[in-house]
Amino acid sequence: MQEHSPRFKFTRRLLLPYSGEEPLTRSQARRVIFSWATVFPLALLICTLPVVVVFGANASLQRVAIILLLVFVAGVVIFGVMAWFVVLILNRSARLFQKQQAHTSARISKPSGGRYGS
């Protein structure tokens, strides 16, 4: 019998492919960290463009490029560290869940009747 694996939407698979029952693999964790460190800073950079255009109308092109580069690099650092922390916590909670499931199934499989087996 095949196990049912949830099929998430593309954005969910890209940003957080997590079911809650098992820890993320190293490749999944790297993909989550890389995607968070690129997708969110790019969105932040695109949202920053109108602000830079309005307030930096008389600024040089070099200054505008430096501001945009700083926004992107700061976003990569912030969201990369945040994704690393999220992966760490999710993996820890999944391992605890697995340990609890193993403990519960081991307790259920014991013969009933207590100390004397009756």
Image (cartoon, rainbow, N blue to C red):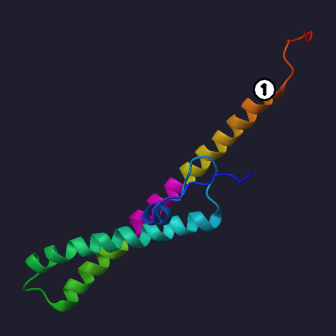
Give how far across and how far down residue 74 sits, in percent: 35, 70
| Along the line of sight, the residue nearer the viewer: 82 or 91 | 91
| Along the line of sight, the residue nearer the viewer: 93 or 19 | 19
The residue that appears at 12% across and 86% down in the rendered structure is: 59
Instruction: Work out whether 64 lies above or below 71.
Output: below
Q: Give the prevailing secondary structure in the magenta stretch.
A: helix
Give how far across and how far down residue 43 sits, in percent: 30, 71
Left or right, 94 with respect to 64, comes to: right
The residue that appears at 28% across and 69% down in the rendered structure is: 44
Quadrant of the rendered structure where residue 71 is? bottom left
Residue found at the far bottom of this picture: 61
Task: Say which element carries label 1.
Answer: helix
Looking at the picture, which amino acid does disc 1 mark? Arg
Residue found at the far right of this picture: 116
| Along the line of sight, the residue nearer the viewer: 67 or 104 | 104
Q: Dot 1, how many residues are within 10 Å of its Cα: few (below 14), some (14-19), or many (20+)?
A: few
Give how far across and how far down residue 53 sits, in percent: 12, 80
Total of numbered circles in the picture?
1
Quadrant of the rendered structure where residue 56 is? bottom left
Instruction: Work out whether 114 lies above or below 51.
Output: above
Check the picture and name the quadrant holding the C terminus. Answer: top right
Residue found at the far front of this picture: 1
Instruction: Work out whether 94 lies above or below 72.
Output: above
Magenta extent:
75-87
The residue that appears at 68% across and 52% down in the rendered structure is: 3
The residue that appears at 75% across and 51% down in the rendered structure is: 1
Asked whether residue 95 is drawn in magenta, I would say: no
Instruction: Work out whether 70 lies above or below 59.
Output: above
Give how far across and how far down residue 92 sits, in percent: 61, 47
Residue wearing tag 1: 107
